[in-house]
């Protein structure tokens, strides 16, 4: 059939972000704006992943000319948008694993770089200016915008990092600052090594916590002690130094189900070499585990007390607020050479507040908080309601109250005996420090 002339049309059609509305049309290019914000919380058909795969068959008839363009502020490291970004950088044998994927990442002001070099001189100033670099070379208008950007970043660095610098947020509304979490994982602090330990010492008192879950979920464990470092004023300052952080993964067990007896046997070995003052368990399915652990400790003549910790919403927030304050003040140190340190770091970065309590993510690469709970519990036990509360506590073995706490003003047993002789009260002659049996 002859026609007078060849003609074609390209039509741009806005559509709702719904998989059903996208299907069926002959489409050459599909553009998803602010794609990172298309999460599955509004329903599966509205998620970016569902819309993306619904659009692919419509592009097939255009072959290599078909394209899907995902445009967005980075938002958070969870979801389909972040997954595709990572896939675009994957390499196998020096070749792109997904050769049809291409990604660009740049700050907002990159679009206006070198605008003054435009031969047509169409722009008098940039729409956005970087707060970095030498501002003296900028025009008066650009100086004002650079200063405005600088103040905006100081007011809300996390928001500015995502919306202007184009950097990924660890998680939306994260409870802990990602940079402070990174700082907590060290190999040394003030020239003192921070390493995973395989045995304890009588210099410190150790505290341990277990966070069991269902047999098909994770099982967390952490043990740490209080250690003093000189503060900015030169005075001793209490810090929490972790000796072991560990997570048992159900995938490492037959049938992908955690075998509690195996885990308790391993924890017993840690109890033997550290002899902690206290071993606590989270309340979930803890009665049987606590009784079994007590029996093991009794048979091995280990005096560690084993208790259950009730995790109400109020206690949860108090515990995590203590951890947050301690991490922000750089009072928590976790060895980077523990096998589960990297996973622990990710867990802590992905914590967020939901319904009045600190909780795990339901999406993304990390959807647990087993070890984070253990770290928060041990930190709360050692530092109490907040950092500095135990600044007066001296480390080392002392005579007096259970747990090694000193008597009165950290007096030695000799001072205590001499004072008792003067007052006529206190230890009897049989308790004379010169005749007492040597402490084991």
Image (cartoon, grey):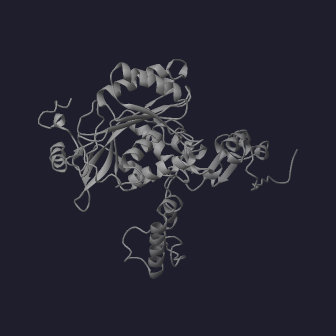
Give the farthest residue toward the front.
424
- Please indicate, yes or no, whether residue 116 appears anywhere in the rendered image: no
Relative to 93, is 288 on the left or the right? right
Give the farthest residue toward the bottom.
140
- Please indicate, yes or no, whether residue 432 appears anywhere in the rendered image: yes
Relative to 124, is 407 on the left or the right? left
Give the farthest residue toward the left.
434
Q: Position of residue 103 (x, y in %)?
A: 53, 48
**Residue drawn at (59%, 55%), measured in percent from left and top?**
72
**Residue drawn at (33%, 51%), measured in percent from left and top?**
390
Tag count in the figure? 0
Q: Position of residue 351 (x, y in %)?
A: 51, 47
On the image, which quarter does residue 364 sit in? top right
Quadrant for the C terminus in the image: top left
Closer to us: 104 or 49: 49
Say above or below: 148 vs 89. Answer: below
Q: Position of residue 246 (x, y in %)?
A: 41, 33
Closer to us: 89 or 168: 168
Closer to us: 264 or 24: 264
Relative to 192, is 279 on the left or the right? right
Relative to 182, is 51 on the left or the right? right
**Residue drawn at (48%, 68%), measured in percent from left and top?**
155
Quadrant for the N terminus in the image: top right
On the image, which quarter does residue 56 sit in? top right
**Residue drawn at (18%, 43%), measured in percent from left and top?**
413
């Amino acid at each position: 059939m002859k026609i007078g002339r060849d003609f074609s049309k390209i039509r741009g059609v806005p559509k709702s972000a719904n998989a059903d509305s996208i299907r069926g049309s002959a489409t050459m290019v599909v553009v998803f704006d602010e794609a990172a914000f298309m999460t599955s919380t509004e329903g599966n058909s509205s998620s970016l992943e569902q819309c993306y795969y619904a659009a692919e068959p419509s592009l097939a008839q255009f072959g290599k000319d078909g394209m899907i363009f995902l445009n967005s502020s980075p938002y958070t490291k969870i979801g389909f948008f972040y997954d595709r970004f990572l896939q675009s950088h994957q390499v196998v044998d020096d070749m792109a694993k997904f050769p049809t994927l291409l990604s660009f990442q740049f700050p907002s002001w990159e679009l206006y770089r070198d605008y003054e070099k435009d031969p047509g001189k169409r722009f008098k100033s940039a729409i956005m200016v970087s707060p970095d670099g030498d501002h003296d070379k900028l025009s008066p208008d650009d100086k004002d915008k650079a200063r405005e950007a600088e103040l905006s970043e100081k007011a809300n660095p996390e928001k500015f990092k995502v919306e202007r610098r184009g950097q990924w947020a660890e998680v939306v509304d994260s409870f802990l600052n990602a940079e402070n979490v990174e700082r907590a994982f060290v190999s040394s602090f003030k020239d003192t090594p921070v390493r995973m330990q395989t045995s304890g010492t009588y210099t410190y008192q150790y505290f341990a916590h277990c966070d069991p879950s269902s047999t098909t979920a994770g099982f967390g464990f952490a043990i740490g002690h209080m250690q003093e470092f000189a503060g900015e004023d030169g005075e001793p300052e209490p810090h929490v130094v972790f000796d072991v952080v560990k997570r048992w993964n159900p995938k490492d067990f037959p049938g992908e189900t955690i075998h509690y007896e195996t885990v308790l046997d391993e924890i017993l070995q840690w109890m033997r070499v550290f002899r902690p003052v206290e071993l606590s368990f989270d309340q979930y399915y803890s009665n049987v585990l606590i009784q079994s652990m007590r029996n093991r400790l009794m048979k091995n003549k280990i005096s560690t007390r084993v208790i259950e910790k009730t995790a109400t919403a109020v206690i949860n927030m108090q515990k995590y607020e203590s951890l947050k304050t301690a991490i922000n003040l750089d009072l928590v140190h976790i060895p980077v050479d523990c096998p589960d340190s990297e996973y622990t770091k990710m867990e802590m970065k992905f914590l967020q507040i939901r319904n009045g309590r600190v909780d795990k993510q339901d999406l993304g690469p990390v959807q647990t908080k087993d070890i984070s709970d253990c770290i928060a519990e041990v930190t709360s036990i050692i530092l109490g309601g907040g950092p500095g509360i135990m600044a007066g506590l001296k480390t080392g073995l002392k005579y007096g109250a259970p747990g090694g706490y000193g008597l009165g003003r950290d007096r030695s047993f000799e001072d205590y005996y001499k004072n008792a002789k003067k007052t006529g009260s206190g230890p009897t002659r049989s308790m004379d420090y010169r005749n007492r049996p040597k402490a084991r």
